[in-house]
Image: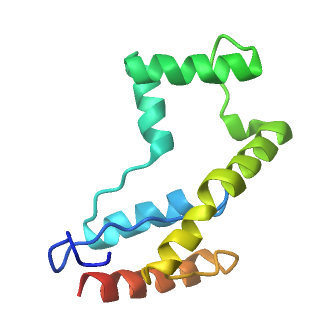
Amino acid sequence: MDGTDTPRGCANLVLLGPPGAGKGTQARMLQEGFDLVQLSTGDLLRAAVAAGTEAGRAARAGVCDKCGASEMTRRAEDNAETVEQRLRAYHAQTAPLIDYYDARGVLARVDAMAGIEAVSQALRTIVRKTVA
């Protein structure tokens, strides 16, 4: 989004937030509203597991090593321990990106605690400014 490698009218948008913040919901809405391409690491890993790719096998092994299960039939968010682990991972691995993007002047903040439509409107405004 700094314009150095991105043609005018194109942008890479990154939605950052803790698990359950609504990133997937908002990304789908932006995808439909602006004809964008959405990449979700979770969706990509689930597809890789389903396809039996090397990355999928590694993801499955990592999950099963942590939880001791051999089948992935429930969503990871189904228990409090997993949510707690995901929040710890977010704060350790993802939250530092906020400072990274902020220092480069390309961070836009949205209060994800607002209603879905208010968040969506704020994001649409940011996208319009970004790709203009």
Residue 22 visible? The answer is: no
Figure check: 68 above or below 114: above
Picture coordinates of residue 83, whole percent (x, y):
77, 45
Q: Is residue 104 above or below residue 26?
A: below
Q: Furthest-right residue in view?
A: 80
Residue 51 or residue 99, whichever sits in front: 99
For this orientation, the residue located farthest to the top is 70
- Residue at image position (34%, 64%) is 31
Rendered residue at 52%/79% (across/down): 102
Please give the name of the residue rendered at 42% of the width and 80% of the height, measured from the top-left corner.
Answer: 106
Number of numbered discs visible in the structure rendering: 0
The correct choice, above or below, for 71 with respect to 37 in the image is above
Q: Position of residue 53 (x, y in %)?
A: 37, 18
Q: Quadrant of residue 64?
A: top right
* In the image, farthest residue toward the left: 7
Image position, residue 49 (x, y; %): 46, 22
Q: Residue 98's spot in the image, x, y percent?
A: 57, 70
Which quarter of the figure is the C terminus placed in? bottom left
Q: Is residue 32 above or below residue 58?
A: below
In the rendered structure, the answer to whether residue 101 lies left or right of residue 86 reads left
**The N terminus lies in quadrant:** bottom left
The residue nearer to you, when weighing 109 against 125, is 109
Query: In this view of the protein, which residue sits in the foreground, 57 or 119?
Result: 57
Q: Residue at x 65, y 63 (%)?
A: 21
Instruction: State how the image is colored.
Output: rainbow
Answer with the quarter of the image where residue 9 lies.
Answer: bottom left
